[in-house]
Image (cartoon, rainbow, N blue to C red):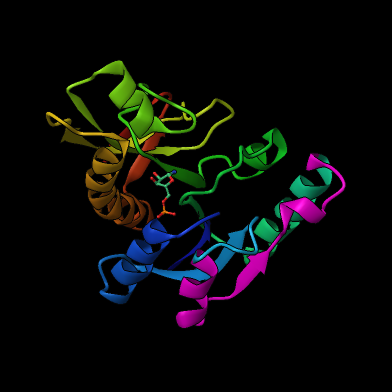
């Protein structure tokens, strides 16, 4: 069994999808830790309901970003996780962390990357008037949402969609995509080949 740790900052519906997939034996993993930068995150309740240990690193209490990153690096090392899953983690990971866990951090993004990286991928899609958007799970590198892509799903933008309706349809696909990517990782089926991720 692989050990995974999840980083989340908010409501944690993707975290819940991962917990459920592990419980249903769709993902051969143990969720060893939730790490959050936000003491108010609803994800914390979800972890406690399942007796998953929680590390809260309240960003506001650190004197600098460097100090926060140092504490985060230490917490991540202590997890002894095979994989770190960013599931609505609303901060950019520093270079030190990305380098320390190269090929071991994945992120879920609510757009078809490389389109609409950064915040509010769904809003950007609506504003741009695209006809198709979706979600992406990718490895994290030092770029902004630009690491090697593992899984993507398309979601059609419908007449009359706004940010909210599109977000909720994309979210349904996120909840399937993220466990799928974690399963492929845990089964040792992902091979990073430059920019490309091959699935064997
Ligand atoms: C999701 O849309 C995810 O793609 C983005 O942040 C949102 C988190 O939602 N990175 P939740 O906290 O998992 O419900």
Q: Is residue 51 located in the magenta-colored stretch of the structure?
A: yes
Residue 181 vs residue 93: left or right? left
Residue 196 vs residue 176: left or right? right
Could you tell me how many numbered marks the image carries?
Answer: 0
Q: Is 130 above or below relative to 58? A: above
Expressed as whole percent of the image width and height from the top left, the position of residue 145 reads 47, 30
Residue at the location (39% across, 24% down)? 116
Determine which quarter of the picture holds residue 12: bottom left
Q: Residue furthest right?
A: 63
Q: Is 17 above or below relative to 119? A: below
Q: Quadrant where the N terminus lies?
A: bottom left
Q: Residue furthest top?
A: 128
Question: Which residues are the magenta region?
Answer: 43-65
Residue 129 vs residue 53: left or right? left
Expressed as whole percent of the image width and height from the top left, the position of residue 155 reads 18, 36
Residue at the location (51% across, 37% down)? 140
Expressed as whole percent of the image width and height from the top left, the position of residue 134 reads 25, 35
Expressed as whole percent of the image width and height from the top left, the position of residue 89 reads 53, 48
């Amino acid at each position: 069994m692989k050990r995974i740790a999840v980083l989340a900052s908010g409501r944690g519906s993707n975290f819940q999808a991962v917990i459920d997939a592990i419980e249903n034996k769709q993902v051969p993993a143990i969720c060893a830790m939730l790490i959050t930068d936000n003491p108010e995150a609803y994800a914390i309740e979800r972890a406690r309901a399942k007796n998953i240990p929680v590390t809260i690193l309240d960003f506001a209490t650190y004197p600098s970003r460097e100090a926060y990153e140092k504490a985060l690096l230490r917490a991540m090392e202590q997890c002894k996780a095979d994989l770190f899953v960013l599931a609505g983690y609303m901060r950019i990971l520093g270079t030190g962390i990305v380098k320390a866990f190269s090929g071991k951090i994945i992120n879920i993004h609510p757009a078809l990357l490389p389109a609409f990286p950064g915040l509010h991928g769904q809003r950007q899609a609506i504003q741009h008037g695209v006809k198709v958007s979706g979600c992406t799970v990718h490895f994290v590198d030092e770029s902004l949402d630009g690491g090697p892509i593992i899984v993507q799903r398309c979601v059609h933008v419908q007449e009359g969609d706004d940010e909210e309706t599109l977000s909720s349809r994309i979210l349904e696909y996120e909840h399937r995509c993220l466990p799928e990517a974690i399963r492929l990782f845990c089964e040792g089926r992902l091979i990073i080949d430059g920019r490309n991720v091959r699935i064997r």
